Amino acid sequence: MTHPWRVRPEAETGADAAAVRAVDLAAFPTAEEADLVEALRADAEAWFGDLALVAEDERGTVVGHTVLTRCHVGASPALALAPVAVLPDHQGQGVGAVLVRAALEAARKRGEHHVVVLGHPSYYPRFGFSRASVHGIRVSFDVPDEALMALTLDRSVPLPAGTVRYAAPFGV
C-alpha cells in the first residue's frame, strides 16, 4: 500500500524544530510534550540526533515524529521512546507505527539494547513491548502497571531489572 507520507531516511534536523513543535502541539492537549522535546534536544547526555525521526507528506511537510533518548534501567543504559506524535489529520494511517519501527531499527543499528515506553497498552505490544513489571522494571511515580512497557532489541542481552531513571527534562 502506498501512503501520501514517508519516514525520512535521515534524522530530524535543526530546520525541523518548529514543524516538530507544531506536530506536538496539534497531537497533544497541552504543550508539555512539545516543551519536553525542546528540553531533550538541549540535553547532550540524553539526545541522539540519529534517533529523532520525522515523517513527511508528499510536499515535505512534517506530519509526525518520534524520539528515543537516553535513560537507565537500574545501572543499565536504555532508551525512552517519547513522544510519538502525528498530526490529527494523519492519525490512523500508520504514520506512528512506521515511525516507531524505524526508530527501533535505528536504535538496534547503533548497538542499543533496551527501550522503555509509557503509553497505551493496546498499541505498543505490536512492536514487541511487554509489561515492564514482569521484568522487574518500575518507575518512581504512579502509573498503571500495564502502561509501562519494555523491549529488548537484542535477545542475547536480557532486560535488566530496576527503576527507570529518565533524563532530567522528563522531570521525574
Image: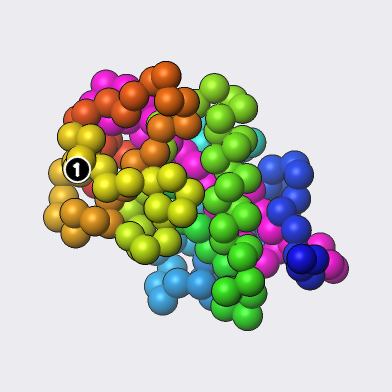
Residue beneath the point at 55% across and 51% down: 100
Residue beneath the point at 58% across and 43% down: 103
Q: Is residue 148 left or right of residue 49?
A: left
Characterize the local packing of mark 1: few (<14), some (14-19) or many (20 or more) Cα atoms within 10 angstroms.
Answer: some
**Residue lying farthest to the right in this orientation:** 59
Q: How many marks?
A: 1
Q: Which percent across, then down, holds residue 73?
A: 28, 30
When the figure is inspected, residue 107 is found, relative to residue 28, above or below; the finding is above
Q: Amino acid at mark 1?
A: Ser
Q: Which percent across, then down, holds residue 82?
A: 44, 51
Residue beneath the point at 70% across and 63% down: 62
Helix, strand or loop at label 1? It is helix
Q: Is residue 154 left or right of residue 139?
A: right
Q: Which residues are magenta?
A: 52-80
Q: Which percent across, then down, holds residue 78?
A: 39, 30
Q: Is residue 79 left or right of residue 59?
A: left
Q: Which residue is mark 1?
A: 133
**Residue lying farthest to the bottom in this orientation:** 89
Residue 59 included in the magenta stretch of the image? yes
Q: Which percent across, then down, holds residue 74?
A: 23, 26
Look at the image and tell me whether residue 145 can be seen: yes
Q: Nearer the viewer, residue 33 or 147?
A: 147
Q: Is residue 106 left or right of residue 77?
A: right
Q: Quadrant of the N terminus?
A: bottom right
Magenta stretch: dominant SS? strand
Residue beneath the point at 48% across and 49% down: 127
When the figure is inspected, residue 87 is found, relative to residue 64, above or below; the finding is below
Residue 20 included in the magenta stretch of the image? no
Q: Nearer the viewer, residue 32 or 108?
A: 108
Look at the image and tell me whether residue 169 can be seen: no
Quadrant hosting residue 151: top left
